[in-house]
Amino acid sequence: RCDKAWAAASAKLKAVAGAEVQGTPAESITPKRRYWRASFADGSRANMAFEKKAPGKTLVSVEHGKLASAARIDAVKEAWRELMIDCIGVD
């Protein structure tokens, strides 16, 4: 499952698009979703949610807020896209 692949990959994650992870990311699980949340050195925050759908399917959402500019948004968006491709093999 992709949430388990992310759990393994996130343990090694030091930065996203050059912004270092601050502290230890928080993880939580509810009956419906698994969550991952992190703060970054540039003041931004990321929230991820994994929700199991049909057998073999998982909905993954990523929200990365408090970004300083449109250029930074584009850079972070591309970084998350690459992380997901590397981690769970999706594009």
Image (cartoon, rainbow, N blue to C red):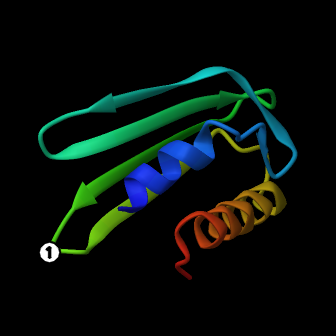
- Which residue does the numbered mark 1 point to in the structure image? 54
Quick one: SS at disc 1? loop
Relative height, residue 22 to residue 46 (above, below): above
* Number of on-image labels: 1
Task: Report the residue at 12% width, 39% height from top.
Answer: 31
Query: Compared to 45, does 70 lie above or below?
Result: below
Residue 81 versus residue 5 in the image, above or below: below
In this rendering, position of residue 6 left or right of residue 65:
left
Residue type indicated by callout 1: Ala
Query: Residue 54 occupies which quadrant of the picture?
Result: bottom left
Residue 60 position (above or below residue 26): below
- Residue nearer the viewer, 20 or 57: 57
Where is residue 13 drawn, in percent x and y? 71, 41
Q: Is residue 31 left or right of residue 70?
A: left
List x then y, in percent, for residue 55: 16, 74
Quarter-of-image position of residue 46: top right
Q: Residue at x 70, y 69 (%)?
A: 82
At horizontal 80% and vertical 31% (from top left) the residue drawn is: 42
Tell me where residue 2 appears, x and y as whole percent: 41, 61
Q: Nearer the viewer, residue 8 or 49?
A: 8
- Quarter of the image with the N terminus in it: bottom left
- In this view, which residue lies farthest toward the bottom? 91
Left/right placement of residue 46 relative to residue 3 reads right
